Image (cartoon, helix red, strand yellow):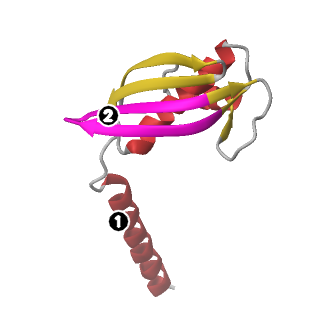
Amino acid sequence: MRQMAVITLVALMCAGAVSGCEAGGDVSRFAPDYQGVETRLLDGDLVNFHVQMTGARTADDVDRYAECAAAQYALIRGYGFARHLRTNVDEEGGIWRGDAVYTISPALPRGLKTIDAEVVAADCAENGIPMV
C-alpha cells in the first residue's frame, strides 16, 4: 500500500512538472496595441479597411483586427453579413499593417469566407479587439 502511495505521489509530481513547463515556458505574452482603422467605401457594398497595430504574433492577428472592423462596419450600415475578399499584411520595424477588402450585405452572401457580423462583433468585443 505504501509503495502505491509513493508511485502516485511521484506521478503527480511529474504531471505537475510537465504542466508547469507548458504554462510557464518560453511563451511570449500577447500584448497587442491596436493603432487604428481607416475605412474607405470603394463602390456600393465593397469596403476597404486599413488597420495598423504592434504586438501582433502573426499576420492572423492583423487579419482578425480587419475582420472585426468589417463586422462592426456592416452593422453600422444596417447589414448583417460580410464576405472577405482579400487581406494583404505587411510588417516593418514591429509595425503591422493590414489592407483588407470585404463586401457587406443584408443577407448571407455566396462564398466561403462569409461572416455573421453580429457574432463576429460580439466575439471581438469580448476579446478586446477594437472596431470601427
Instruction: Label the magenta part by its dominant secondary structure.
Output: strand
Q: Position of residue 65 (x, y in %)?
A: 47, 31
Q: Amino acid at mark 1?
A: Ala
Element under disc 2: strand
Stretch of the chain drawn in magenta: 83-102
Residue on which disc 1 sits: 17
Is residue 116 in view from this perspective? yes
Crowd band around label 1 with a 10 angstrom C-alpha radius: few (<14), some (14–19), many (20+): few
Among all residues in the image, which is located at the extreme left?
Answer: 93
**Along the viewing direction, whichever of 52 and 16 lies nearer the viewer:** 52
Element under disc 1: helix
Residue located 58% across and 26% down the image: 70
- 77 vs 97, left or right, is right
Q: State which mark lies toward you, 2 or 1.
A: 2
Residue located 23% across and 36% down the image: 92
Residue located 37% across and 54% down the image: 23
Residue located 32% across and 53% down the image: 24
**Along the viewing direction, whichever of 70 and 9 lies nearer the viewer:** 70
Does the segment drawn in magenta span residue 103? no
State the mark number for residue 40.
Answer: none
Q: Position of residue 33 (x, y in %)?
A: 34, 26
- Residue 93: name its quadrant: top left
- 104 vs 33, left or right, is right
- In this picture, is 111 found above or below 24? above
Residue on which disc 2 sits: 96
Q: CA distance from mark 2 to mark 1?
A: 36 Å
- 17 vs 131, left or right, is left
Q: Amino acid at mark 2?
A: Trp
Does the segment drawn in magenta span residue 94? yes
